[in-house]
Amino acid sequence: MQLADFVDALEAPSIELTVVNVSGAGSEHVTGMFEDLFERQDVTVNTAVGDAETENLVVLKRNGERVARSQLEDVGDAVLFVNSDVYVTGSRELSEVETPAVLAALTDVPFRAKGYPSTRKEKFLLIEVSRFIEALAYREGAGRLHSGFQQLSRIDDEKGTRVVYETLAATDVDTHVYGCGEWSPSGSLSAHSGHAALDEVWFVVFVPPEGSDAKHAALVCVADDDGHWRGFWTFDRERVHEIEAFVVDTYQD
């Protein structure tokens, strides 16, 4: 079995995102950016005029059922208007992560993103989901977190990533990091580097402690030969446990 098998096994739901009552200076431009974000995904994006008084509202429907809503402005602040410096420099702390509901709720949907050096916003969405899961672990303050970085040196190279994992290590979260290369963790972090395939996977998996009401969560991405990422994120408890079991059995020393 490979981590890619979890991606290949997905049965994609029908996903529709609708921006309702587009109004205000610049809103049409932001709506266009939002449409571009999902241009290559199995997601339908459209606009509509509704009876609700709320303007620039993004509504998510899964298989025809409304499951989440967020303001377009909040989506912009989380993904559309950011650049990599937000994540590299650590200008946003874990306590400040507020991922819009319509983005977090795009669970179990196949997703594709260009890898480095592309600056397409679709990759920023995957990074935002990574931060969302890390923030879940931080707010719970306990449980187990597994994160794959391709190269462990990224933890030191990117100040933002280092700060995030130093913050997590200061809690009771049992935190494991994975990647290729030699790197000595500080504090209570556990590092694992003994598997060559770690250079081709990206994952963040959080399992809360027994009895907790916190979400189980996992992001899983694998690199294709052309340098693209394909993956998904999920809050399905059973699926998260299966992913964690695979990570532990396959990648831990």
Image (cartoon, rainbow, N blue to C red):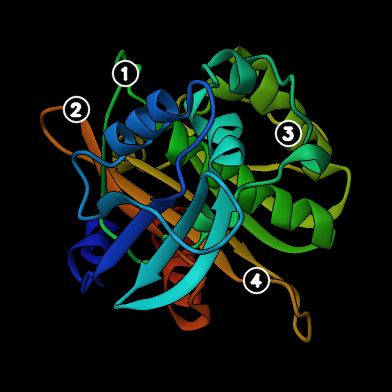
- Identify the element where label 3 is drawn: helix
> Around disc 2, counting alpha carbons within 10 Å, would you say few (fewer than 14), some (14 to 19), or many (20 or more)?
some
Secondary structure at badge 4 equals: loop
Q: Does residue 103 appear to the left or right of 177 in the view shown?
A: left
> Which residue has dot 2 on it?
227
Side (left or right) of 42 relative to 23: left
Disc number lying in front (4 or 3): 4
Q: Looking at the picture, does residue 149 appear above or below residue 9?
A: above
Q: Indicate left or right for 131 with 200 as reference.
A: right
Residue beneath disc 3: 164
What residue do we see at 72% from left, 49% from top?
135
| Residue receiving disc 4 | 215
Would you say residue 192 is visible in this rendering?
A: no
Does residue 130 appear to the left or right of 16 in the view shown? right
- Disc 4, disc 3: CB below 8 Å? no
Q: Position of residue 163 (x, y in %)?
A: 76, 26
Label whose residue precedes the other's in the sequence (4 or 1): 1
Please tell me whether mark 1 sits on a helix, a strand or a loop. loop
Q: Earlier in the sequence, mark 2 or mark 1?
A: 1
Residue 153 vertical position relative to residue 125 in the rendered view, above or below: above
Cα–Cα gap, marks 3 and 2: 26 Å
The residue beneath circle 1 is: 116
Q: Quadrant of the N terminus?
A: bottom left
Alpha carbons under labels 4 and 2: distance apart: 31 Å
Mark positioned earlier in the residue sequence (4 or 2): 4
- Whichever of callouts 4 and 3 sits on the residue coming sooner in the sequence is 3
Whether tag 2 and tag 1 are in contact, CB under 8 A, the answer is yes
Q: Earlier in the sequence, mark 1 or mark 3?
A: 1
